[in-house]
Image: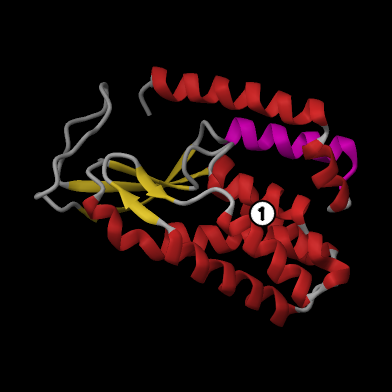
Amino acid sequence: MPFSPLKFLLFLLAVAVLIGFIQVGLISIAFDKLGLSPESAYLLLVCTLVGSMINLPLLHLKADRSVPMRGPPGHPPFTGKIRVVANVGGAVVPAAFSIYLMTHNQLNPVQIVLAIALVAIIARGFSRPIPGIGIGLPLLITPIAAALVATILDPQQRAPLAYIGGTLGVLIGADLIRLKDISRLGSPIASIGGAGTFDGVFLTGLIAVLLA
């Protein structure tokens, strides 16, 4: 994809905020509760940061021509179809880490499905399509919901269950279920997982673990 100064500035801002989080130990605490070693935690963070700059093409959707397109400078001319991509840092890495947690913790499959479903319902209810930007979701709603659901379902394994329910619940409820709304966003490109590093999926997982 063409270089975007805005995305690069957002990336630098995300790095600065990430450093601040690390300095106060919040991320370290969250990953420690998930049973990760410091080395594994930093590897996950690096994968998230690098992955936030990578988008994998998935499919094309027909755009609603009644909504004006607001594509950034440098992109190819709009052809009437919206390209849907998956952000590696914001979708692929959190989903892969969730699968890792499922296989390395004694979690009940029924509780996993229930946690994801409940958070997805909440994410769907509170998310809203914002023309020219994407799907908006209040930051703390889903982490609090994921933490509460995980604590109720499995107090002993609430940290990994909160992360799994939070990340996959947001991906399903705020991104996948709302694919039908993408045609009215007024953007030629729609990214599942958002900007990547500090979008709703990444932050939901970490905050949910801290709250659990």
Residue type pointed to by label 1: Ala
Look at the numbered disc 1 and give the secondary structure of its residue.
helix
**Above or below, 74 relative to 168:** above
Q: Position of residue 2 (x, y in %)?
A: 35, 23
Q: Which residue is found at the position 36% from the left and 45% from the top? A: 134
Q: Residues within 10 Å of mark 1 (few under 14, many from 20)?
A: few
Q: Which residue is found at the position 50% from the left and 71% from the top? A: 121
Q: Where is residue 151 in the image (x, y as percent from the top left)?
A: 78, 69
Residue extent of the magenta highlight: 36-51
Q: Which residue is found at the position 55% from the left and 35% from the top? A: 52
Q: In which quarter of the image is residue 162?
A: bottom right
Q: Where is residue 207 in the image (x, y as percent from the top left)?
A: 69, 49
What residue would you read off at disc 1? Answer: 96
Q: In this view, does 25 lie to the left or right of 52?
A: right
**Above or below, 75 relative to 100:** above
**Residue at the farthest bottom position:** 110
Q: In this view, does 111 lie to the left or right of 51?
A: right
Q: In this view, does 108 lie to the left or right of 191?
A: right
**Is 129 or 107 nearer to us in this picture?**
129
Q: Position of residue 165 (x, y in %)?
A: 65, 64
Give the colouring mode of the picture: secondary structure
